[in-house]
Image (cartoon, rainbow, N blue to C red):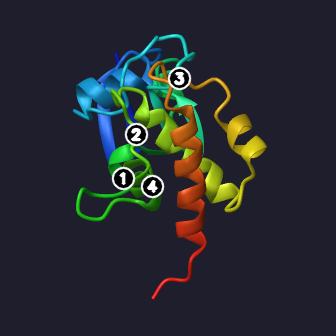
Amino acid sequence: MALVTLSVDGQSHTVDAEPDMPLLYALREDLGLNNPRFGCGLAQCGACTVLMDGQPIRACVVPVSAATGEVRTLNALGTPDRPHPVQQAFIDEQVPFCGYCINGWILYAVALLERDPDPGDADIREAFAGLKCRCGAHSAILRAVKRAAGQLQAPRA
């Protein structure tokens, strides 16, 4: 075991863990975060997604010792009273059916819109390659990302 310091959602945390333990386990078990979620454990579905230094990563396969950047989870985006524009767009478009995978889709959308505020359909599809939604909400997800892009580009009062 080793002490590993993680920067998660703007706060520093020290966990006692095996260096090769998946980051996902530290986030859920040691820090008590209920997202990201365990999906496949093989980096194939995206339910475990977090952003590290603004880039989506699959926390189920990243060793805790490799999480040296700033980790941002869904918890850091918005609140129930003031959701992030991407979260609000997913709500407005009624994206989640079961909602299990939504963590990955929202964080990938945030990362995409932070680097490209006006993505086209092909850009959105490419950014989401490899994410899985077994409920089939893909059309609603595409609409939500476009809605969020419009909200993020709109002048703020």
Quick one: SS at disc 2? Answer: strand
Residue 50 lies, in percent from the top left, at 47, 37
| Residue holding disc 1 | 76
Relative to 35, is 101 on the left or the right?
Answer: right
| Furthest-bottom residue in this view | 157
| Residue holding disc 4 | 89
Query: Which-is-in-front pick, marks 2 and 4?
Result: 4
How many numbered marks have been drawn onto this rendered protein structure? 4
**Which mark identifies residue 6?**
2
| Residue holding disc 3 | 62
- Gap between marks 3 and 4, in whole Å? 29 Å
Q: Earlier in the sequence, mark 1 or mark 4?
A: 1
- Gap between marks 3 and 1, in whole Å? 20 Å
Q: Earlier in the sequence, mark 3 or mark 1?
A: 3
Quick one: SS at disc 4? Answer: helix
Residue 148 lies, in percent from the top left, at 53, 59
Residue 10 lies, in percent from the top left, at 38, 55
Quick one: SS at disc 1? Answer: helix
The structure residue drawn at horizontal position 33% and vertical position 31%, both measured from the top left corner, is: 27
- Gap between marks 1 and 4, in whole Å? 17 Å
The structure residue drawn at horizontal position 39% and vertical position 24%, both measured from the top left corner, is: 24
Q: Amino acid at mark 2?
A: Leu
The structure residue drawn at horizontal position 37% and vertical position 31%, both measured from the top left corner, is: 36
Q: Amino acid at mark 3?
A: Val
